Image (cartoon, grey):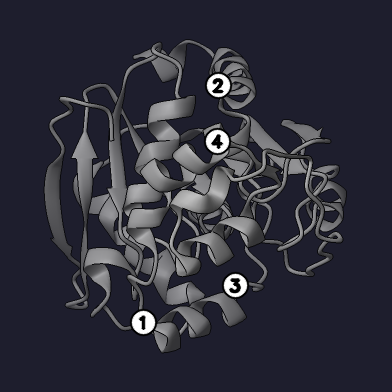
Amino acid sequence: MSEGRVMAEFVFTSPAGVTLRGGRHGEGMPLLALHGGYSARGEIEAILDAVLPEVPPFDRWTPDLPGMGDSVDTAVDDAEQVVELLCALVDAEFGGRKFALLGHSLGGFLARAVAARRPEQVVAIALLCPLPGELQPEPATVVQSEPGAADVLSDRERAEFEGYFVWHTAQAVERFRSGVAGSLDRYDGDIVGRIMESADFDIGDGADSVPMLVVLGRRDSLLGFRSQAAQAAHWAAATVVIVDDAGHALPHEKPELVRALLADLFTRAGSVVRT
């Protein structure tokens, strides 16, 4: 979180009685930003701080997904129930207003599913290393390593860092500590497992014509990039970027590139995203 930022917290209870907790910051068009599996909203908030252009301004909504973060006690049976809960949040809090979506990993799959159910409201979708229906992970590699850079991490943190980042440098370690480490182990494994295993349902083509950005890491050893690139080739308004020297932690490792690509996405989305 940026120094000095005031983050408001929200608590939303759906008509079905399911509670979702999260953070909210800023003014402007609503942006629903969704973190990945086995994580929490602190990571996606750090990503937003690093990659969102200053213009246009957004009213950022960053829920902790069920079974994670401050929503750790929110139990769901599958990923479709998560999408239903997120759509209920959109309907109650955004009303009929236009909004944008951004998701990393599992959050990318969920973001596209929400967009498919509310295509008339969604003006832009950004998918960062999204979870595909078919995993095709790449071999684990290291792009660059600085001896001793990870020595400041605990054994638990170091194992997570080295399995996630392909840049093993002091700068990458600092980004991990500030943006990822605080979300470690803040989840219910049973709930998250059910969500992850069921995040492969057919969401339809409702979102395929919405301006979209898909950014993939060629060295993603967790999810891969080939399935997502093949799927996105059929989407009418998608810009697809495969970044050679990045892995699943791409938004942490290449924030300047992602920021430029998001600026292009919002330009393509037109004046509606600036209202």
* Between 76 and 1, the one nearer to me in the picture: 1
Residue at 64%, 53% (x, y): give it.
130
Height in image: 266 above or below 114?
above
Q: Can you identify the residue that label 3 sits on? A: 199
Categorize mark 2 by other alpha carbons within 10 Å: few (<14), some (14-19), many (20+).
some
Q: Can you identify the residue that label 2 sits on? A: 259
Look at label 3 and name its amino acid.
Ala
Residue 69 lies, in percent from the top left, at 29, 65
Residue at 21%, 23% (x, y): give it.
27
Look at label 1 and name its amino acid.
Asp
Q: CA distance from mark 3 to mark 4?
A: 34 Å
In front: label 4 or label 1: 4
Residue 211 visible? The answer is: yes
State yes or no: discs 2 and 4 in contact (Cβ < 8 Å).
Answer: no
In front: label 1 or label 3: 1
Q: Give residue 88's quadrant in the image.
A: bottom left
Look at label 4 and name its amino acid.
Ala
Q: Give residue 50's quadrant in the image.
A: top left
Q: CA distance from mark 4 to mark 1?
A: 31 Å
Which comes before the other along the chain, label 1 or label 2?
1
Q: CA distance from mark 2 to mark 4?
A: 21 Å
Residue at 57%, 12% (x, y): give it.
267
Categorize mark 3 by other alpha carbons within 10 Å: few (<14), some (14-19), many (20+).
many
Categorize mark 1 by other alpha carbons within 10 Å: few (<14), some (14-19), many (20+).
some
Q: Please, what secondary structure does the residue beneath circle 4 have?
A: helix
Height in image: 141 above or below 199?
above
In front: label 3 or label 4: 4
**Disc number for residue 188:** 1
Q: Can you identify the residue that label 4 sits on? A: 170
* Between 147 and 238, the one nearer to me in the picture: 147
Height in image: 136 above or below 76?
above
